[in-house]
Amino acid sequence: MKGSAHQPASIRFSARLQLALSYAVFLVVAGCIMLIGVYIVLRYVPNYPLTAANPGDQRMPRVASRQEILNVLVGLSGFILVGLALVGIVGGWLLAGWILRPLKRINSAALVAASGRLDHRVRLHGRNDEFRQVAESFNHMLDQLQDAFAAQQRFAANASHELRTPLTITETMLEVARADPDGQDYRQLIERLSITNTRAIGLTEALLRLADVNAVTAASEPADLTEIVNDALALNLTEASIHQVTVFSELTPAPIVGDSALLTQLATNLIQNAIRHNHPSGEAWVTTFYDPVRQTTSLRVSNSGDHFSPAAAAQLTEPFLRGHGRIQRPGSHKGYGLGLAIASRIVDVHGGGLSIIPRLGGGLDITATFPVRQPVDIEQETTGRPVHRLRRRYA
């Protein structure tokens, strides 16, 4: 049968054996070079009979000639090289075992991690060599994997909870109607079912948008972040008026290379977050600017609102985590807790960074910073328009 033939196992040469053999070969080659050098030197010794200082004294040993010394050297060379090979193999094996000992611990940790235990770490102490650097890099990789798996588990659990809630409500209303069909106000029942179904559809669409952002790579097209933000402000003017939030904008030319659709989604999410999670008669500030020294373009959105701790603010990019936790507060905006999660992912796919800092007076200060890979001439990027600050107030 095809594919069922047993493949012979190949001979396994471990790194320790390879190092030992390499050490032995090195000693043998060095010995050969040394013996050849001695042989060449002896070839230049004058070939005349050598006698003792007192030829009449029979007790003095006979001095060997050059040819005899060369013959002895050639005869002993084989034994010397064999001895060097044995010393190289045994000594190299012991030395390689001592040097490669940290590698065994790294391999054991990798096997433990492969079994699913991501909390295990490689503990190497002593000299700061290449093995310790590899161990530290491996531990850093495990930290990132553990955080990623934990976030993925939280996302799956929270997504299941969020999707189950409208379905449970729908099922409850249908069961009540089924138990007492004559005592129902079907107009009101249909209205409630429509609202619940609409929320479920909206949540599903938000999850799909998050999945789309996670799956795509941002396009590389020149754009002006100022124009994108200005359009997003205009679209959210009505919502700002409904929430009685005054929005101030200070927009300067901010060239960027990226995906205009994703950047529009980013600006919209940040602006809506500043409007919806605010106090009545609150304020929000939107700023775009280009830093020629650091070669970065930034979008900064600040708003008044509730107080946050630095730890709580740093967790707001987790999916389904709203300002007051995962449970929606009565009277608050009926969002899905995905706005900042989508914004964070959009910034990531553009190679930028998103910082969320609590404001001293309450609310948040969110800054999205994007790298500009080559120097930008602001005058040229704005097609000859003078550099200016566009200040607007949306009330």
Image: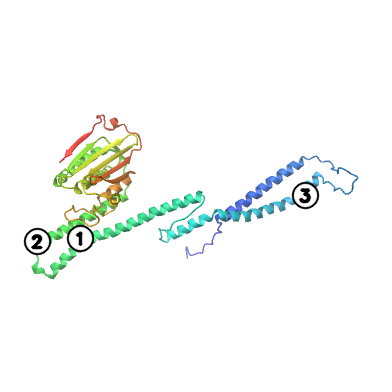
The reply to whether dot 1 and dot 2 touch (C-beta < 8 Å) is no
Q: CA distance from mark 3 to mark 1?
A: 97 Å
Q: Residue at label 2?
A: 187
Q: Which residue is mark 3?
A: 72
Number of numbered markers: 3
- In the image, residue 321 sits, relative to residue 382, either above or below, namely below
Q: Earlier in the sequence, mark 2 or mark 3?
A: 3
Q: Earlier in the sequence, mark 1 or mark 2?
A: 1
Q: Residues within 10 Å of mark 2 (few under 14, many from 20)?
A: few
Task: Give the amino acid type for the residue marked by disc 2 in the picture.
Answer: Arg
SS for dot 2: helix
Q: Tell me which numbered mark, 3 or 1, is placed earlier along the sequence.
A: 3
Residue under the image location 24 percent in, 39 percent down: 287
Find disc 1 in the rendering and name its residue: 166
Task: Give, as a three-letter code, the residue at label 3.
Answer: Val
Picture coordinates of residue 113, whole percent (x, y): 43, 58
Is 374 rendered above or below residue 139?
above
What's the residue at 35%, 54% (across, down)? 148
Circle 1 sits in a helix, a strand or a loop, which is it? helix
As displayed, is residue 163 above or below residue 257?
A: below
Residue 6 point in image, percent of width and height: 51, 64
- Residue at the far bottom: name it: 179
Q: Secondary structure at mark 3?
A: helix
Q: Which mark is residue 136?
A: none
Colour scheme: rainbow
